Image: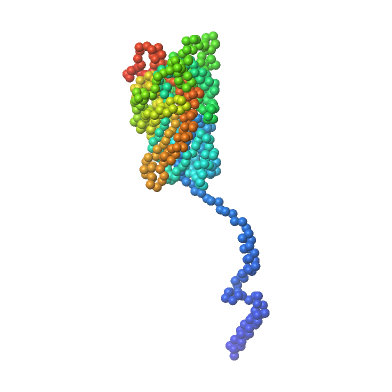
Amino acid sequence: MDMEEEHDGCTSLVASHCAVMAENPSTAPPEGEPGSKRQKLSTVAASDDEKIQDAAPTLPRKPRYKRRKVAIFFAYCGVGYQGMQKNPGAKTIEGDLEEALYLSGAVPEQDRGQPRRYDWSRSARTDKGVSAVGQVVSGRFYVDPPGFVERLNTYLSPQIRIFGYKRVTQAFNVKKFCDRRRYVYLIPVFALDPSRHRGEIDNCLECAERGGNVLGATGKSVVESETVVEAVELGSGILSNTESASVEEKIEKVHSSDDDGTVNVDSEKNSINGTEEIKADSLNSNTLLNCSTGSAEKANDNGDDRSHTGDETSKMMECKSNGEESSETKSEFCYDNAVRERLNRILKYYEGTHNFHNFTTRTKAEDPSANRYILSFNANTVINVEGIDFIKCEVVGQSFMLHQIRKMIGLAIAIMRDLTPEPTIETAFQKKVNLNVPMAPEVGLYLDECFFTSYNKKWGDSHEELSMKDYTEVAEAFKMKYIYSHVASSEKKDGVAALWLHCLNRHYPEADNVHLHETTDTLPSSDEKPSDAITTDE
């Protein structure tokens, strides 16, 4: 009985609960779902949310680009710049290029001014005023979207032009993978004529006038053996460095000696007149040193400027501004086969591995870096630019030191002008000999191309070939418009080579006197010391 009463009680409770749920259907849970689960939002509210979401504007995602390891090929006219390598406080090609890379978006803000963060490297360094047609730099840059070259050129001066770029391996370093470098130096044909621009500069009317003009235009002065250089504007709109480093180096060596105690040539005996030593404090208002000519304009004992007599005036008319003589005294010198063979024979002395410590500055003979390997050196081509004939001297080597090529050219010209014998080159290679080698002006020198033979051989199947083949036409156009025209205009207007030849004469006063007086004396033989006043460390 008790069990039946308990069962009837449970049945009545269930029945009452069902009755309550029937009276309040909204509280009843949906079929098939537990009563504790939350109800869905109303369909009306969901519809409104969808309309709001559809009405909101959809912003496009900004594309994200990756950095690419590339090699950039470009050219520049070095006039007005203090060289290729970045130097704080100086206007350099590298400085302008780094800024253009940032402005074009190739380098982010956090890497601006920190080239190591994007693996920056250069294939070659050029001196002040030296140009380049085949310069190459490498790094990790944002080259996308298309139009990277155009964007970069927008922020560069017209005398710096980007030709293009090529993808390289991640481990690529343009300096380490560059096997060879080819430089070209343009020598005016008249510079090889021993009879041209010979003797005192005062006996050459046009060169004497140039000397005064160059001195005034550049504002050079000698203060504690340092020269102050200013740039002058040429007609082409390119800034020009009119300073010639040959005499600048001479001034530097007057007050210096080698660390090992060996006195250099100019500090011991060479001077502006071949007999006296130059002192910086002895250069006053009446003795102005012209660094481009290597001459000094002195006043006479009465304090008046020296005037030219009739005989001197006739001698001064022998030279003209573009290196050509007057019709009465025109030389028949030309770059014929005999002259070409002689110059190539002289240049061949440089080929091979030699110690070039005398062809640079601040490098000891014992320093392993003084040993350099020259693959080839020749002068077989003559070009005419604005009416002046120039000889293209092409030198190919693994690497070069500061001023090395200009000094090699300077000594070769001195030999061609019979100022010193050919064996002087071999003498300059000797470790125990310190020789003051003349240095040619920087105007005629430019970097022609960098070669990556080993890299192309190893990675040619998977990467683009690194060469100037794709940029030949645009490179030639740039060369003619900026580099060749500047070299020719510098010679026509300022007579850079002609003035330097007079400086070269003062570098070898004994040989110059022999030539001028037309005596029967001969130049020093190969067994005698040349007029360079060689000193040894012994």
Residue 426 in the image: x percent, y percent?
34, 24
- Residue positioned most to the right: 23
Residue 203 in the image: x percent, y percent?
47, 14
Quadrant of the rendered image containing residue 469: top left
Can the viewer see residue 137? Answer: no
Q: Name the residue located 65 percent from the left edge and 80 percent from the top edge.
A: 22
Residue 273 in the image: x percent, y percent?
45, 15
Q: Nearer the viewer, residue 482 or 37?
A: 482
Q: Specify the quadrant that holds the C terminus.
A: top left
- Residue positioned most to the left: 527
Q: Is residue 212 above or below residue 397?
A: above
Q: What colour scheme does the image use?
A: rainbow
Q: Name the residue located 40 percent from the left edge and 38 percent from the top edge.
A: 451
Q: Name the residue located 41 percent from the left edge and 24 percent from the top edge.
A: 189
Q: Is residue 524 left or right of residue 283?
A: left
Count the numbered circles shown.
0
- Residue positioned most to the top: 302
Q: Name the residue located 55 percent from the left edge and 43 percent from the top edge.
A: 109
- Residue positioned most to the front: 327
Can the viewer see residue 192? Answer: yes
Q: Is residue 311 above or below residue 397?
A: above
Q: Nearer the viewer, residue 336 or 7?
A: 336
Q: Specify the quadrant that holds the N terminus.
A: bottom right
Q: Is residue 458 above or below residue 436?
A: below
Quadrant of the rendered image containing residue 194: top left
Residue 47 in the image: x percent, y percent?
63, 65
